[in-house]
Amino acid sequence: MNLYALLGVTRNASPDEVERAYRRLARRYHPGINPGDRDAEQMYEQIQRAYSVLGHPERRREYDRGAAPAAATIETTVSFAGFDFSTPAQGPMAATFSELFSDVFQDAAREAIAPSRGADLEARVELSFADAIRGAQVPISIVRRERCAACAGSGLLPRPAVTCTACGGSGSRRWARGHMVFTKNCERCGGEGRVSVQPCGGCGASGLQARSEVVTLTTPPGLEAGSRLAIPGRGHAGARGGPAGDLYVAVDVGEHPYFRRAGRDLLITMPIAIQEAAFGARIDVPTLDGRVRLRIPPGTTSGQRIRVNGYGVPATGGAEAGDLIAEVQIVLPPLQDDRSRDLLREFARLNPADVRGHLFE
């Protein structure tokens, strides 16, 4: 498998071009964006492996020379060196077989130098009601661990070669559990007996440094409260050149003074005057994108709903646009003078119908 072809870049691509290609593909095939898609999940894993090689200068050079793109691991050979009965095997020097295997294998695992994926980050943002419906670009301030610039993420800096203090220059280390004595290559010098690197002081040999960063989150139209969005590659950087984790953003949505949401529809309570309800009218109704003209039929009652097609949540991802639903609320205008009061009394005399009679049938 050609790792360059997998990321869609040439062999001459710069590190920035490789990283941009990785982020673009990781965003496209991320499992959080393609739930249940096994092909996308496998592609995402291949992209992660490709970037763990091409995103690390030394491993990229080895790959270009024809080396297999395998993750770096430490080879620790443990040899049994016999028994030592000169000291008693009591107290802390006495060992069970479980402790012996813990020494032999767990130490090697802890000191392995294979790249590892960075941890994911969590953040939370609040969108206005209008931005959640229309979509928006939201800046998010985060603190993430990034590769140390001084050591390029390796955690080590070159230095003049000196005798390894861990093994005294022998290249191997010896230890005992009980009466059994074991030897293995010194991990600090790789069995060479001399050390030509030193821990990076800038990052404390971790290869990572914390830094503040502003990430722009692009939200899709029609986002609902409680949604969780993923930004691939914007989590903590991976140790020893491993790929970065992802940033997950939980979304809260503020309330609107007039609109409410019901699925893909927007609801608004629309006051109309009593005479508009009686004789009908044409009124302006607000939307999130301006005004729309609405016809009120004669004899409209309070609570009646009038639908305006296409003025709800915008169409996205194959879903149709929602509607604006105006719920009528009949309002009696203030009575400004005696003439208005007399006319209202005359109206009541001429129309004596009991509007609550159905409640007692």
Image: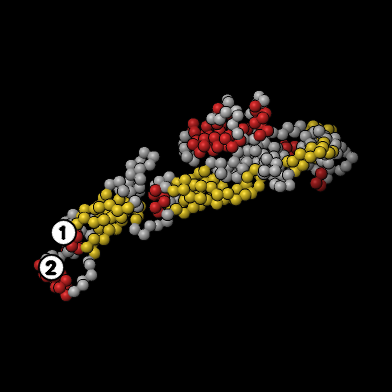
Is residue 202 visible in this depiction of the protein?
A: yes
Quadrant of the snapshot with the C terminus: bottom left
Q: Quadrant of residue 302?
A: bottom left
Point out the residue furthest to the bottom here. Answer: 338
Which residue is located at x 34 percent, y 56 percent?
259
Residue 123 horizontal side relative to residue 82, left or right: left
Between tags 2 and 1, which lies in front? 1
> Would residue 49 be found to the left or right of residue 92 on screen?
left
Where is residue 271 shown, x and y percent of the image? 26, 61
Q: Secondary structure at mark 2?
A: helix
Classify mark 1: residues with Cα within 10 Å, few (<14), some (14-19) or many (20+). Answer: few
Residue under label 1: 279
Q: Residue at x 22, y 67 (%)?
A: 333
The CA distance from mark 2 to mark 1 is 14 Å
8 and 234: which one is in front?
8
- 158, above or below 121, in the image: above
Give the side of residue 28 with respect to residue 189, left or right: left
In the picture of the structure, the residue carrying the numbered disc 2 is: 347
Q: Residue at x 52, y 51 (%)?
A: 140
